[in-house]
């Protein structure tokens, strides 16, 4: 193996740059040429490459987003597009790829390898949703929950000042991994997540109980994928039955995807990028790098994308006990 490529795909996540940096510098340490591929699979199809030495990744470890950028690629969904990507790889003499992304990225990588068995790909889990099987934490997750927590703390200040009930929507179209820890960390009265059925009657009882405890404000965290349709819809339904507070809604949105990665984010992303290169050198392919119980693990793409983590039921129970 002489030359590898690295790209980021899907939604950007804080820590991706730290992972890119680790891939480039680990590759150079082991005598490999490293090429950056801009705009994910789109860059693979278009041949949008850039040579990357240690200097190219200097000063990026603290930056959010991704210096390689990301994009949706309709062409890669077609056999013709994947064939062009393969031809571009061969023209550039790339022996292997490190793909940083989520389940969509690894699904595309798996299809690509099935069609072209001589292509070796190792993945690093880059998504703020933390919904991939095979790792305790994905790249971007720690920063996202800390960003959400800080924003909610600020909102809570104004909620306390005005006796208000705030419904705060966080990201999580399919899972409540952002909503649950931020709700617990911020002392929310309730959390609504896609994994559990939402009962407006039960939620109203919780809020009424809070009023009985002389609380001067309440916070409810809503994952965007909640079955009722998000924070605005939940607030509307609660407002019909609960007159105790002024009701406000705040959508944190893409705020959670940006910002400087936390210390642990940078460390984990660096570990994963380093491990990805080592895995390729050891002849591994079709696996996602993860960290479980502080140890590096390799999980096949198929298992990583088909099996999802479950929410911790104890944390859900704690929300009710501690609110």
Image: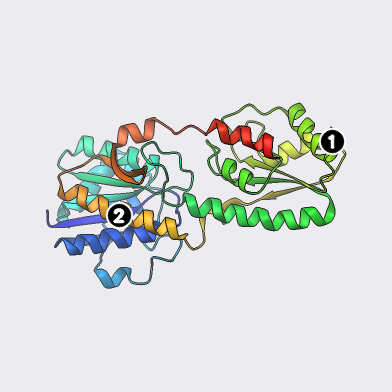
| Residue located 15% across and 44% down the image | 283
Q: Coloured how?
A: rainbow
Judging by the rendered image, the residue that carries numbered circle 1 is: 242
- Secondary element type, mark 2: helix
Image coordinates for residue 212, horizontal then vertical, percent:
85, 37
Image coordinates for residue 179, horizontal then vertical, percent:
59, 42
Q: Is residue 310 left or right of residue 209?
A: left
The local crowd at label 1, few if under 14, some if 14 to 19, many if 20 or more residues have their Cα within 10 Å, is some
Asked if residue 163 shows in the view, the reply is: yes
**120 w.r.t. 175: above or below:** below
| Residue located 26% across and 62% down the image | 24
| Residue located 60% across and 40% down the image | 224
Q: CA distance from mark 2 to mark 1?
A: 50 Å
Q: Quadrant of residue 31?
A: bottom left
Q: Is residue 220 left or right of residue 260?
A: right
The local crowd at label 2, few if under 14, some if 14 to 19, many if 20 or more residues have their Cα within 10 Å, is many
**8 w.r.t. 231: above or below:** below
**214 w.r.t. 89: above or below:** above
Image coordinates for residue 200, horizontal then vertical, percent:
74, 29
Q: Nearer the viewer, residue 94 or 150?
A: 150
- In this view, which residue lies farthest toward the left? 1
Q: Earlier in the sequence, mark 2 or mark 1?
A: 1
- In this view, which residue lies farthest toward the right? 243
- Secondary element type, mark 1: loop
Image coordinates for residue 198, horizontal then vertical, percent:
67, 29
Q: Nearer the viewer, residue 257 or 22?
A: 22
Judging by the rendered image, the residue that carries numbered circle 2 is: 273
């Amino acid at each position: 193996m002489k030359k590898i490529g690295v790209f980021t795909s899907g939604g950007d996540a804080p820590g991706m740059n730290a992972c890119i940096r680790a891939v480039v510098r680990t590759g150079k340490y082991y005598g490999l040429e490293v090429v950056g591929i801009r705009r994910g699979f789109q860059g693979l199809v278009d041949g949008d490459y850039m040579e990357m030495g240690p200097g190219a990744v200097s000063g990026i470890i603290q930056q959010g987003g991704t210096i390689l950028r990301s994009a949706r690629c309709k062409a890669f969904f077609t056999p013709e597009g994947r064939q062009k990507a393969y031809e571009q790889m061969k023209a550039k003499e790339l022996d292997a790829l490190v793909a940083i992304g989520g389940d969509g990225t690894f699904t595309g990588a798996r299809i690509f390898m099935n069609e072209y068995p001589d292509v070796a790909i190792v993945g690093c889990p880059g998504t703020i949703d933390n919904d991939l099987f095979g790792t305790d934490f994905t790249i971007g997750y720690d920063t996202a929950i800390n960003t959400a927590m800080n924003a909610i703390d600020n909102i809570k200040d104004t909620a306390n000042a005005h006796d208000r009930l705030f419904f705060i929507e966080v990201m999580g179209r399919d899972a409540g991994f952002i909503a649950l820890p931020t709700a617990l960390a911020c002392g929310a009265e309730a959390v609504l997540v896609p994994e559990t059925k939402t009962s407006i009657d039960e939620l109203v009882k919780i809020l009424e109980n809070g009023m009985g405890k002389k609380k001067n404000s309440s916070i409810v965290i809503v994952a965007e994928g909640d079955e009722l349709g998000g924070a605005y819809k939940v607030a509307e339904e609660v407002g019909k039955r609960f007159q105790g507070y002024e009701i406000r809604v705040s959508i944190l949105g893409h705020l959670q995807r940006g910002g400087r990665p936390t210390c642990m984010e940078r460390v984990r992303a660096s570990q994963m990028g380093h491990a990805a290169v080592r895995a390729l050198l050891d002849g591994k392919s079709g696996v996602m790098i993860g960290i479980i119980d502080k140890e590096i693990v390799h999980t096949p793409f198929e298992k990583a994308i088909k099996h999802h983590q479950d929410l911790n039921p104890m944390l859900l129970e704690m929300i009710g006990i501690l609110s």
